[in-house]
Amino acid sequence: MPKSNKISMSVIRRLPRYYRFISELADSGEQRISSGKLAELMNVTASQIRQDFNCFGGFGQQGYGYSISYLKSEMENILGLNKVNNAIILGAGNLGKAVALHINFAERGFNIKGIFETNPNIIGTKINDIEVMPESQVDEFIKNNDISIAMLCIPRQSVATIIDRLYNCGIKAYWNFSHFDIARKYSDTVVENVHMTDSLMTLSYRMNEKLKSEEKTEGSSYCLYCNPCSSGDWSDRI
């Protein structure tokens, strides 16, 4: 099946999860899997998996399933994990340090070549054997080290003061932990915004919806006139 020319962002955002599960299967020695079995593991429908994979041409044969090694290789090609992207981290405070220490960038095709900071108490220290450099050196470093990605672990106001310098040095891809809207200022950039509080509020919403659903189920037999309420209006519930 031919590859789809226009792929929705919802499909793209599911790809890393597919890759994670497929990598775990490969590591455990599995060689082949059906869409149904993969759907069970991932708690999605087999139909969704087939539709998502078909956006990229499909990777299996009906009744034969998917070769896990081939699927993993194709996912790496699609996600661009089969090539090395040189990156820098701006900010070596609590967030930047955690990002640098606890994410296996090399395994995902990223090479962290430099870490930059403005705090004189942090400059000169080492994180994962990388010496933290002063922010004033970032322009020259980018030009001399073929940097294509900047990971921004700094406050919004700090991004506002440095983004022009980064862009003018040729950086057009950003992993952005700040709330600064880079794409609005530079429309030709590729930006992945990370808002952890948004994720936390999404969790809160889902918890709230689950609680309301449970309350509705528990109270469904106590509507006025002793009949289950089918209208969804609980204003008359006793």
Image (cartoon, rainbow, N blue to C red):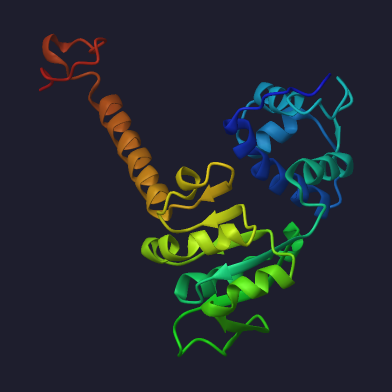
User: Residue 49, how many percent across, how many down?
Assistant: 69, 28
User: Residue 98, how many percent across, how many down?
Assistant: 53, 72
Task: Name the residue furthest front.
Answer: 168
From the viewer's perspective, tell me whether residue 119 is left or right of residue 17: left
From the viewer's perspective, tell me whether residue 136 is left or right of residue 223: right
User: Which quarter shows the N terminus?
Assistant: top right
Q: In terms of image quadrants, where is residue 11?
A: top right
Using the image as rendered, state which of residue 171 and residue 127 is in the foreground.
171
Q: In terms of image quadrants, where is residue 216?
A: top left
Q: Which residue appears at 82% of the width and 52% of the height? A: 82
Using the image as rendered, state which of residue 120 and residue 224 is in the foreground.
120
Q: In terms of image quadrants, where is residue 127?
A: bottom right
User: Which quarter shows the C terminus?
Assistant: top left
User: Residue 230, how many percent across, how many down?
Assistant: 26, 10
Q: Which residue appears at 89% of the width and 25% of the height? A: 64
In the picture shown, does residue 3 fall above or below 162? above
Using the image as rendered, state which of residue 150 and residue 184 is in the foreground.
184
Q: Which residue appears at 58% of the width and 47% of the height? A: 189
In the picture shown, does residue 131 fall above or below 110? below
From the viewer's perspective, tell me whether residue 119 is left or right of residue 22: left
In the picture shown, does residue 73 fall above or below 213? below
Q: Which residue appears at 53% of the width and 41% of the height? A: 187
User: Residue 151, how many percent across, how many down?
Assistant: 57, 62
* Total marks in image: 0
